[in-house]
Image (cartoon, rainbow, N blue to C red):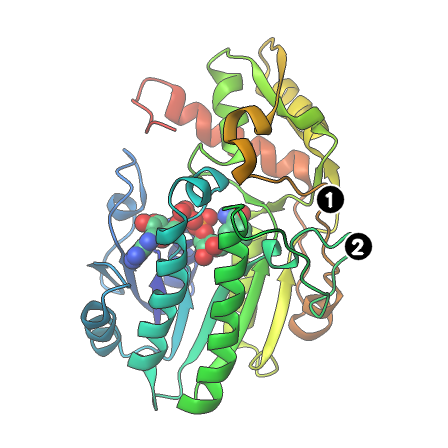
Amino acid sequence: MQRVLVTGCNGFVGSHMCERLIREGYAVTGLDIAPYGWEDGFVKTVGGGNFEYLEGDITGERFAAEAVERAMPHIIIHLASVVGVNLYIKDPLKVIDVNILGLRNLVRALKGSGARIIFSSTSEIYGKNPTLPWKEDADRVLGHTPVHRWAYSTSKAAAEHMLWASAAAYGLEAVVLRYFNLYGPRQLPHLLVPAQIKRALQGEELLVYDGGRQTRCFTYIEDAVSGTLAAAISPLAPGEAFNIGSTVETGVEEMTLLIGSLAGLSFNIRKVSTAEIYGNVYEDIPRRVPDAGKAAGILGWRAGTPLREGLLKTIEWWKGQVGGKELKPD
Ligand SMILES: NC(=O)c1ccc[n+]([C@@H]2O[C@H](COP(=O)([O-])OP(=O)(O)OC[C@H]3O[C@@H](n4cnc5c(N)ncnc54)[C@H](O)[C@@H]3O)[C@@H](O)[C@H]2O)c1
């Protein structure tokens, strides 16, 4: 039986990933710094013979080494990170520490094991490169370092460099996945899609930031999990970076209006400015579009879930959360 260690297992991607791996018959060890505390969250719904949960902080060298020693993984799916623009701005040092020290501790612990490590990187890597769609070898175009939002992109990129170097030095199989705007059930409401859904279901105004003309390629979680699994098992994946994203570009205002209408309640829109909320430590990216041809060609993967279908599933899940239980604060 193949053993998989999933870091950040209590997170949005991690919880879905663990569920899929368990269903597919892998022996899974999940680690996370803390449980989310959702009423029907991952820790309470998944478990059993082929799953073990380890609680700890991967920026601690000893914890990371012990986790690897205990899990003895053939594959590591490394998802632990600090995620969300509000958090990059609030605590950039934590973002950098988790992205860089976390990976450093894991690769050192894996040295000589020959394991495959899948590193969850991000579309933010490409920054504000205006030449779209972005192939995996596109240039990284980033802003000034006092703008904290770039700390996430830069530390993920530094971690990618560390990964390639560690693969060569420590005899590991490395794969980089750059996710594009994932959404789906269990994503915390400081992220754009769940924030709007939660507001819609609670009868609050929907917020449209900076005019709403920015575009994103929203990618449903189950598609991302399938792409990650393909990268974990394909013999052709090691040594490669892949964009994991839908190629359907949608305006942020358009997505917001769609959520409002799918939620089935009357709603109002309020335009807000990120400059007023975040000041000069934030800069928005006008368009973000992947070229997903490499993942299709090598992994046989494509994001197949239409936005409307993925949003409906996500709204249904949120209805269960909003219906009576206390929600985790934004
Ligand atoms: N969700 C997206 O749209 C998206 C887009 C691009 C990249 N990614 C990447 O995918 C990965 C998963 O993202 P997500 O959306 O599931 O985020 P998430 O915040 O839901 O999950 C991250 C998990 O990592 C855990 N964690 C944080 N610091 C830790 C530490 N020091 N030690 C152990 N665990 C720690 C958190 O507790 C959390 O459960 C991240 O690496 C993220 O950068 C996500």
Q: Quadrant of residue 172?
A: bottom left
In the displayed structure, does residue 107 sit left or right of residue 319? left
Pick whichever, 56 or 286, lies toward us. 286
Residue that carries the numbered disc 2 in the rendered image:
132
In the displayed structure, does residue 284 sit left or right of residue 131? left
Ligand 1 within 8 Å of disc 1? The answer is: no
Q: Secondary structure at mark 1?
A: loop
Q: Specify few, some or many for label 1: CA neighbours under 10 Å numbering under 14, 14-19, or 20 or more.
A: some
* Residue 85 image offset from top left, x and y in percent: 50, 41
- Quick check: marks 1 and 2 in contact, CB under 8 Å? yes
* Residue 107 image offset from top left, x and y in percent: 36, 78
Q: Earlier in the sequence, mark 1 or mark 2?
A: 2
In the displayed structure, does residue 235 sit left or right of residue 327? right
Residue under the image location 21 percent in, 58 percent down: 56
* Residue 218 image offset from top left, x and y in percent: 64, 43
Can you see residue 3?
no
Residue that carries the numbered disc 1 in the rendered image:
287
Residue under the image location 28 percent in, 63 percent down: 59
Can you see residue 73?
yes
Residue under the image location 51 percent in, 26 percent down: 277
Residue under the image location 25 percent in, 46 percent down: 35
Q: Secondary structure at mark 2?
A: loop
Pick whichever, 28 or 282, lies toward us. 282
Residue 236, numbered circle:
none
Cα–Cα span, label 1 and label 2: 8 Å
| Dot 2 amino acid type | Leu
Q: Quadrant of the N terminus?
A: bottom left
Q: Is residue 306 above or below residue 78?
A: above
| Dot 1 amino acid type | Arg
Q: Is residue 110 above or below residue 325?
A: below
Q: Quadrant of residue 100?
A: bottom left
* Residue 220 image offset from top left, x and y in percent: 58, 46
